Amino acid sequence: MVLKEHVLHRVIRVICSIFLLTLIAPISPSQSFASTTVTKTVTVKAANDSLYSGAQISVIYFSDGDISESFAPIVTTNSTGQATISYPADASYAQMFITPPSTDTTNAVEVIDLLTSTDSAIANVKLKTASIRVKPTTPSGGDAGTNTCISYPKSPISRWVTTQYRTTRTGAFGVNIPSTLNSSRDYLIELSPCNKSDYRYLGKSFGLRRASNGTVSLYTDNLYKTLLTPTSGVYVLAFDQGNVTGELRDTNGSPLSVADGTYIVIRGTPLLPDGTPDYSTQSAWADNVCSDG
């Protein structure tokens, strides 16, 4: 059957109208992609298998589209060793950090990857025995800010395979150094300023060795020449002070306020005698700026 021309045009117009309405139709609520929240109950036990009361639990996560990572409110385990945590279901990474009180010199901090660990591993956490105790500080000896990053050995195969812990409080805490570390290899503990108040400082690497008899030794740097001496059983890990420090100011001469989610990178380039940049040499970079400039 052959359609008459005016009928054919009418059919085409109807089809086009339906197509355009389909394109501009609003998405119904059932089609939205809002994130849901994952909630889990965590039970913490001490290294001796007793239920652990008073441990702090922090969850740090990042979702696609976010400018920076987010911090869930810190919770504390109750008398039965339990606490409830939450994080978005669409998080691209989510880490749980467990910290015993500063008075506990026996149990070590623990780190759990919430996206790769089994439900059983998340719901039932047994703390390990602390091999050493460390305390992160500023160059002058003051307390480093919370969420300071401490990376310590995880695998015997390489110094670069580490567990990264984020502090939930100030003061000393225990770290478990795996008994599988190779006594003939050199390892590291790395201190990084992950709190905005500490961006004015430089991170530092401390050499670590584990002898065949289980003795753990720390060094003042990654050259493994000078042993770091503990103070009252605690290794003090201090940030380095940069060789060049300064303060960013606005056009009025006031300290520059850096808004959340704003990142500033400063580049230092040597100058030639005529005052032009010497791009043939290495440049110095600073990509951490404190919130007060």
Image (tube, grey):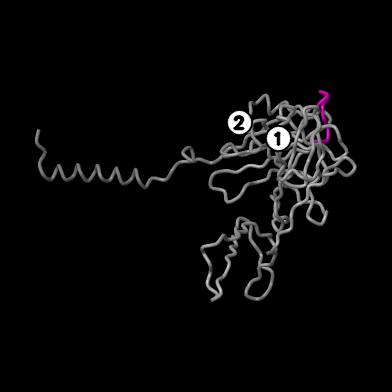
Q: Position of residue 208 (x, y in %)?
A: 74, 39
User: Which image quadrant for residue 275?
Assistant: bottom right
On the rendered structure, is 155 left or right of 4? right
Q: CA distance from mark 1 to mark 2?
A: 12 Å
Q: Quadrant of residue 80?
A: top right
- Numbered tag placed on residue 178 in the rendering: none
How many residues crowd mark 1 within 10 Å: few (<14), some (14–19), many (20+)?
some
Callout 2 secondary element: loop
Q: Is residue 179 left or right of residue 4?
A: right
Query: Residue at image x 71%, y 30%?
Result: 181
- Structural crowding at the residue carrying mark 2, measured as other residues with C-alpha within 10 Å and reported as few (<14), some (14–19) or many (≥20): few
Check the image and report above or below for 13 versus 257: above
Q: Quadrant of residue 60?
A: top right
Identify the residue at image location x=55%, y=71%.
272
Q: Which residue is mark 1?
A: 111
Q: x, y percentage for residue 177? A: 75, 33
- Range of residues picked out in magenta: 47-55
> On the rendered image, what quadrant is the N terminus found in?
top left
User: With respect to residue 52, does 140 lie above or below?
Assistant: below
Labelled disc at residue 116: 2
x, y percentage for residue 286?
Answer: 63, 59
Q: Amino acid at mark 2?
A: Thr
